[in-house]
Amino acid sequence: MAKEKTCFVCASCGHEAARWLGCCPDCGEWNTFEERKTSPTTLSKTAQKAARFHSGESTPVQALSQVPQEDDIRTSTGNEELDRVLGGGLVVGSVTLLGGDPGIGKSTLLLQVAGSLSLRSPVLYVSGEESARQIKMRATRLGVPQDRLFVLAENHVESILEKCEALKPETLMIDSIQTMVSQESPSAPGSVSQVRQCTASLLRYAKQNAVAMFLVGHVTKEGSLAGPRVLEHMVDTVLYFEGDHQHEYRLLRAVKNRFGSVNELGVFEMRQEGMLPVPNPSETLLSQRARGASGSVVFCAMGGNRPILCDLQALASRSFYTVPRRTVGGMDSSRVALLLAVMEKRAGKKLFDQDVYVNVAGGLELDDPAADLAVCAAVASSFQNFPLSSTLCVMGEVGLCGEVRPVTQAERRVQECARLGFTEILLPQQNLKHLRPLPGVRMTGVDTLMQALAIIQD
């Protein structure tokens, strides 16, 4: 009988070594090697069992001109916001990875999509975390069609692929990939090698059988998908669910998409009946805006190619602390601190003894530099206690010298503002030169922060 072999595997990247190492030579992480014992006899048996799902045909070498060209066959998921993020629909044979915090709504959204797709073709929903009865209860609550929606409570990949060979589903959903186990890997469920091996087996099946597949991935405390980074490179599309549990709105972003645009944005509302798409997020986010109050300004952000109007709020009050407080929600706090320094140095706003609070209403996360001018306008409005016009929208990037730099996709932003009834738009002068005038909309261009603050105070 063959003896067990001992190897050391990096828990961060999956690198294997014959002896323990303090620092991984691949990823550079320290103290991540774990001892694993493998049996050659056991591995050979499991490899023979799993070999049925491997392709034994060698792929011939072809000239690119000889490869047949086929258009991507897209299928609507029945959810217009998800279709937008995917680039127009679900591509046959694609593998999509959906990540997000626990309880953000990943399983709920996938179960709704599975019900919509099951009206046209059989769908298999595999859960390694819930029983079939639990899935049935949630599907009934959501009103999901159940006639052609098949469920399987299983976490062994080889068993799942056996069921798929018999059922022949056109869509396969795995919830979640961290709970799956492959007999080809002796490591524990959720480990780097298991996640990588399970994903490779499922990916191979999806490509060979033209099956559209969704994989649910857990997110670590740092906000990245648990498991090796190679997992994101293996799949075709990577989607991230974002949002605050205290708010009902959820944002779905595409950070990788081989079949469409990246950084697209979908907006959903978490309700009792499930994840409902929000077709007009700008109007929804501004519906509860406080009018006539100082420190509130409207800004047009870009979610991929989609303009979204949001309410950006600021509050400046006299500080009673030695070091004034700077609290920011929905933006980079260091960026806000930089803007406050520019306002004090270039615009003469004495904020050194003021507590400043900045917040993006609705739970949105802004990383758009075009929000700089809107932050400065909101802080100045609260600091000097004067309300801004309810029909004003502000956008522009502010430099360290107080100059206002142009923003990207200015025409789309302006058109969205005009569509929602905003008649005054403050934007960089360089963008104004290339924009066509719109009836009923007064656009004002500025070159410096001082000009912008002087205009909004008039």
Image: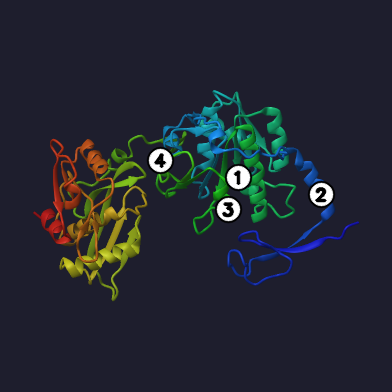
Q: Marks 3 and 2, Cα distance to the nearest angstrom?
A: 26 Å
Q: Secondary structure at mark 3?
A: helix
Using the image, determine if residue 177 lies above or below residue 111: below
Instruction: First in sequence, mark 4 or 3: give its number.
Output: 3
Instruction: First in sequence, mark 4 or 1: give its number.
Output: 1
In the rendered image, is residue 318 in sight?
no
Instruction: First in sequence, mark 1 or 2: give its number.
Output: 2
Mark 2 surroundings: few (<14), some (14-19) or many (≥20) residues within 10 A = few
Q: Amino acid at mark 1?
A: Ser
Residue, x 54% and y 29% (percent of image)?
Answer: 115
In the rendered image, which quarter is residue 60 located in?
Answer: top right
The answer to whether marks 4 and 3 mark residues whose Cβ atoms lie closer than 8 Å is no
Q: Which residue is mark 2?
A: 44
Q: Is residue 20 left or right of residue 442?
A: right
Q: Amino acid at mark 4?
A: Gly
Q: Is residue 378 left or right of residue 369?
A: left
Q: Marks 3 and 1, Cα distance to the nearest angstrom?
A: 17 Å
Q: Which residue is mark 4?
A: 266
Q: Marks 1 and 2, Cα distance to the nearest angstrom?
A: 27 Å
| Nearest to the observer: residue 40 or residue 107 | 40
For residue 176, the mark is 1
Disc 1 or disc 2, which is closer to the eye? 2
Q: Which residue is mark 3?
A: 230
Residue 135, position as x, y percentages in the image: 60, 35
Q: Amino acid at mark 2?
A: Ser
Residue 446, position as x, y percentages in the image: 15, 54
